[in-house]
Amino acid sequence: MAQAAHSFPDAFLWGTATSGYQVEGNSRNADYWDWEQQPGAVAEGHRSGLACDWWGGRWAEDFDRAAADGHTALRLSVEWSRVEPTPAQWDEDALDHYRQMAAGLRARGLTPLVTLHHFASPRWLAERRGWEAGEVVALFERYARKVTAALGAHVNLWCTLNEPNVFTFRSWAEGVLPPRKKDIGLALRVAANVLRAHAAAYRAIHSLQPEAMVGLPIHLRPTLPAHAGFAPDVWAARAQFNFFSALFTDAIATGRLRRIVGPALAVPEAKGTQDYIALQYYTTDLVRFDLTNPGELFGRRAFPPGAEVDDAGFYASYPEGFFQALRWAHRYRLPIYVTENGIGGEGEAGDALRRRYLLTHVRQLWRAVNFNWDVRGYFHWSLVDNFEWERGWTHRFGLYALDRDTQARTARPSAQLYSAIARGRALTTNLVAQYAPQLVPAMFPG
């Protein structure tokens, strides 16, 4: 068999992504902790509990695993509810805990990427109407300034709010995540507050750390018309994309936030407030026009035919969609970091899908790099199995499996595969033949 390699630049970052609430455990001052206790909120009545026990100190052994596997970066988040458990009262011990984590990454040769808000908010903020109230902008700016001052000696790569499109619409339009409301008008008002809070945090970070790189991670979910020549399908697919995937990034480019009805909302303070595109891609949808589905802008979504679906039925592997997402990000002419990408699955079958997903998606990543698009890093979701919101522990994404009873970690074969990619900074024929031999003819024809 002829040998080939798809190589990446030496400076390209290879990491994994995590979030505080999902791995730390016992985030009792967060709004999500209260949400977990609500009947029917989480699959099978699961609780986050101890999670991966990072707050108890197990972050150190997981950082050791990442470093030993040849990773060069790791994404984590700060929990606002730990740093500011009551309004304007700062927990300096919590800040020092995060400072130790950031320093611990640097000591292991891992570049920290720190997110200030990953879905969960302080309980006190939720009690004050949280993201629905305009005061959140100043409150978030104050918090961003405090964390930047505490961690800035170790961190210069930041995200403000994780997936504002998911955060806004799953919480205020679909009513799945806290505060579980279903009001599209309110969702758009929240979106405006989120955008203003991001802009305020962006400026606060730069005032303390002018050299910082700050991004706003977007969940990019390409929507393709089920029939490319059928105008209603084309319209529905475009509408869904514009009002979910593209909403926030376009608003930062233009200073105007689209609304479903009426003129766009002017948010001039947000214009130009990102230094890189933080791209998060998992899957792609085909959209069919459907007049009976106004809640999703008259489009009915389904996975592309033939795409492998994970065991939770939540995501499907569609590598070409990842390349389309990268091409979309490239049009903004900013550096790109892929801040999340992955697929769930347990057991050998689930991890075999994860290996195929990883190989085929890294190949699309290489295509973008090979076109000289400014893609600088890739963060796989996730390092260790963690609490997956409304899916609880039923949806496992980790390169390392977690036994919640013993806290034992077990490397899956996908961990070994990702380690080989990161160490070699390349995708090779031998790796594909070893971990997913059935892919060799398609990935390396001839």
Image: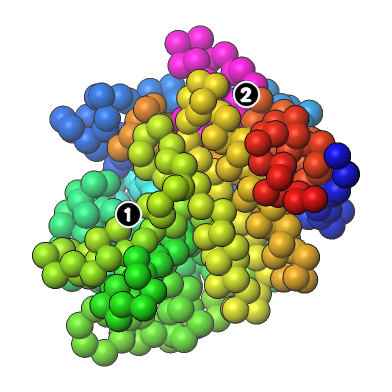
Instruction: Left or right? Give the position of 203 relative to 268.
Output: right
Q: Quadrant of residue 203?
A: bottom right
Q: Secondary structure at mark 2?
A: loop
Cα separation between marks 2 and 1: 30 Å
Q: Amino acid at mark 2?
A: Arg
Q: Quadrant of residue 265?
A: bottom left
User: Looking at the figure, which quarter contains the N terminus?
Assistant: top right
Instruction: Left or right? Give the position of 176 relative to 406.
Output: left
The residue located at (45%, 11%) in the rendering is: 405
Give percent across and percent down for residue 207.
Answer: 62, 71
Q: Between 285 and 251, which is closer to the camera in this rendering? A: 285
Give percent across and percent down for residue 48.
Answer: 37, 27
Q: Is residue 397 magenta?
A: yes
Q: Which mark is residue 406?
A: none
**Above or below for 209 versus 126:** below
Give whichever of discs 2 and 1 has the lower sequence position: 1
Query: In the rendered structure, which segment of residues is drawn in magenta?
Result: 396-412
- How packed mark 2 is, by other alpha carbons closer than 10 Å (few <14, some 14-19, many 20 or more), is many
**Above or below for 29 versus 125:** above
Q: Amino acid at mark 1?
A: Ala
The residue located at (30%, 81%) in the rendering is: 231
Q: Which residue is mark 2?
A: 412
Q: Secondary structure at mark 1?
A: strand
The residue located at (56%, 54%) in the rendering is: 319
Q: Between 43 and 270, which is closer to the camera in this rendering? A: 43
Q: Which residue is mark 1?
A: 302
The residue located at (50%, 28%) in the rendering is: 350
Q: Nearer the viewer, mark 2 or mark 1?
A: 1
